[in-house]
């Protein structure tokens, strides 16, 4: 009986201590100015298609496959992507995303480098100039993740097609 009480006391104590920590508000990551980049072991065309699919919800200003450059038009506020952490959003926040896709190789494997740069600007009022502010990097990471997932999905569909054809 004493062992059961001690065990029950330990479970209730641990549960009450950890449950408070689960619902604490998490702090957003540190801000930075600079590109996010990653090397993907895939053909340039495969990465280019995945990049355009990942950017379907954004208004595109430029999509030039020969130069390997995709740019979005100015996006106001958080209309296309909302950060998971609550942030104070100034009314005049706009941003553009530039993605450069570069052909390359790593040894004998084909490799493609994806570089994502988010240019965030805040204009306080009508008369002031827009000021560049750092990005938290989450949207760039999310886009890289989407690009990698689209490549995986395309490869899986191609493999399934090969298996069905025999």
Image (cartoon, rainbow, N blue to C red):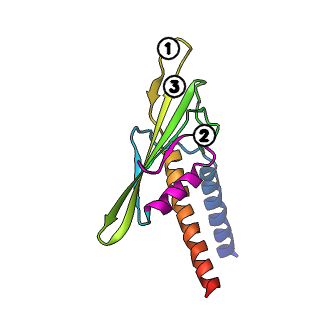
Q: Quadrant of the N terminus?
A: bottom right
**Up/down of 3 relative to 48, above or below:** below
Q: Residue furthest bottom?
A: 166
75 or 69: nearer the viewer? 69
Tell whether label 1 touches label 3 (CB within 8 Å).
Answer: no
Name the residue at 40% across, 44% down. 35
Q: Does dot 2 land on a helix, a strand or a loop?
A: loop
- The local secondary structure at tag 3 comes to strand
Number of the front mark, 2 or 3: 2
Magenta residue span = 44-67
The residue sitting at 58% across, 25% down in the picture is 90
Position of residue 135 measured from the top left corner of the image (x, y, whole percent): 47, 38
The answer to whether residue 127 is above or below residue 166 is above
Would you name the residue on which mark 2 appears? 59
Question: Residue 96 at x, y = what percent?
Answer: 51, 36
In the rendered image, the vertical position of residue 60 relative to residue 22, given as above or below? above
| Secondary structure beneath label 1 | loop
121 sits left or right of 160 in the view: left
* Between discs 1 and 2, the one toward the N terminus: 2
Q: Which residue is mark 3?
A: 122
What's the CA distance linking mark 2 and mark 3? 19 Å
| Discs 1, 2 touching: Cβ within 8 Å | no
Which image quarter is the C terminus in?
bottom right
Determine which quarter of the picture holds residue 157: bottom right
Q: Estimate how packed mark 2 is, as few (under 14), some (14 to 19) or many (20 or more) residues with alpha carbons within 10 Å.
A: some
Q: Nearer the viewer, residue 54 or 64?
A: 64
Q: Position of residue 43 (x, y in %)?
A: 44, 65
First in residue order: circle 2 vs circle 3:
2
């Amino acid at each position: 009986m004493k062992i059961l009480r001690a065990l029950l006391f330990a479970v209730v104590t641990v549960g009450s201590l950890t449950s408070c920590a689960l619902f604490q508000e998490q702090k957003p990551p540190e801000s930075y100015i600079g590109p996010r980049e990653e090397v993907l072991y895939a053909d340039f065309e495969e990465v280019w298609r995945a990049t355009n699919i990942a950017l379907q919800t954004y208004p595109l200003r430029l999509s030039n496959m020969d130069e390997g450059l995709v740019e979005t038009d100015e996006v106001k506020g958080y209309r296309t992507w909302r950060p998971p952490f609550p942030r104070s959003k100034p009314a005049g926040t706009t941003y553009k995303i530039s993605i450069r896709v570069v052909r390359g190789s790593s040894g004998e494997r084909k490799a493609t480098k994806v570089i994502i740069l988010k240019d965030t600007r805040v204009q306080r009022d009508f008369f002031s100039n827009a000021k560049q502010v750092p990005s938290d990097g989450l949207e760039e990471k999310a886009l890289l993740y989407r690009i990698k997932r689209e490549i995986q999905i395309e490869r899986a569909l191609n493999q399934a097609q090969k298996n069905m054809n025999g």
